[in-house]
Image: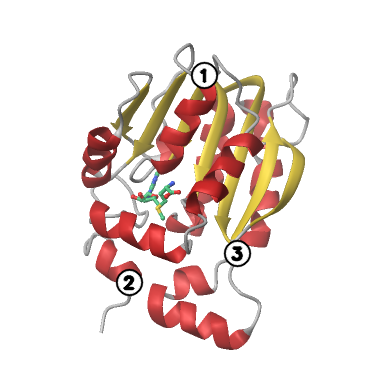
Amino acid sequence: MKNLGQLLQHGHPHPDTEGLTIAHARGYELCGAICFGGMRPRAYGRLARLSGARPGDRVLDVGCGTGYLARRMARTVGPTGSVLGIDPSVEVIEYARGKTREAHCSYETGVAEGLTAPDASFDAVVISLAVHHLPEDLRPAAFQEMYRVLRPGGRLLVADFRPPRTRAVRHLVAASAGHVMADYRVDLLDGLVTEAGFEVRGRGGVRPWLRYVQGVRPERPQSGTAGTTA
Ligand SMILES: C[S@@+](CC[C@H](N)C(=O)[O-])C[C@H]1O[C@@H](n2cnc3c(N)ncnc32)[C@H](O)[C@@H]1O
């Protein structure tokens, strides 16, 4: 029997990426609402604050899915700012467009490991619940791309699923959502952030089950990191 993750994802490799892409936007939305147990608005409001974005900022939401965080970010930056959400899945991008009223919040298909935006074109980059959708070997390239498109001094917020610590509950997650989530090494986010050249400015948890890392692209690249060559 298929688990929830398999039901919501494309059943075959996506032509543009080896990442696990979401095919059923409505189903994903429903699961998001249920799995957060009513805490989604508060959790994503907190992510918007943790992103450090301010009114007037240009924000990129990588792996935006149905656009829940992108719309929240649009409220934060206001009409003088802009939010662009990118995701390889045409289905979620169309859903996100249909849900979004703010003219300064737009969407495009695209992949984290090969962003098409110019260098230094954003003040803040956010990525929520999408790193675990990328195969491990694509993750460093995705973080280098996020570094490249952020201006020096710009901020990165990465948030992802923190698997439960107790084995029994992890089994439950594996049975319902799959091993990609149950066995996800969220503790490796810090290394991905620093290896791309960011300075880590904060980390912590957001209830009910998110872990986040905040990074800043230094004004000058740190020697010995991927950012030196970006
Ligand atoms: C669990 S959803 C998270 C959506 C949204 N950020 C949120 O917080 O609800 C993960 C998203 O990552 C997207 N994804 C998969 N491969 C990707 C890639 N290579 N680049 C960017 N996004 C990708 C999927 O299509 C999916 O929409």
Q: Which residue is more in the foreground, 175 or 55?
A: 55
Q: In the structure shown, which secondary structural element does the residue marked by tag 2 occupy?
A: helix
Disc 2: which residue: 4
Q: Amino acid at mark 1?
A: Asp
Q: Earlier in the sequence, mark 2 or mark 3?
A: 2
Q: Residue at x 33, y 45 (%)?
A: 66
* x and y, in percent, of residue 226 in the image: 65, 35
For the question of whether residue 113 can be seen, the reply is no
Q: Which residue is more in the foreground, 122 or 139?
A: 122
Q: Quadrant of the N terminus?
A: bottom left
Q: Is residue 54 left or right of residue 23?
A: right
Q: Amino acid at mark 2?
A: Leu
Which mark identifies residue 119? Answer: 1
Asked if labels 1 and 3 touch by Cβ distance under 8 angstroms, the answer is no
Q: Residues within 10 Å of mark 1 (few under 14, many from 20)?
A: some
Disc 3: which residue: 162
Q: Is residue 175 left or right of residue 193?
A: left
For the question of whether residue 28 can be seen, the reply is yes
* x and y, in percent, of residue 199 in the image: 75, 35
Q: Residue at x 32, y 71 (%)?
A: 4
Q: Is residue 118 left or right of residue 212?
A: left
Marks 1 and 2 sit apart, C-alpha to C-alpha, by 37 Å
Q: In the structure shown, which secondary structural element does the residue marked by tag 1 occupy?
A: loop
Marks 2 and 3 sit apart, C-alpha to C-alpha, by 17 Å
* x and y, in percent, of residue 102 in the image: 35, 23
Q: In the structure shown, which secondary structural element does the residue marked by tag 3 occupy?
A: loop
Asked if labels 3 and 2 touch by Cβ distance under 8 angstroms, the answer is no
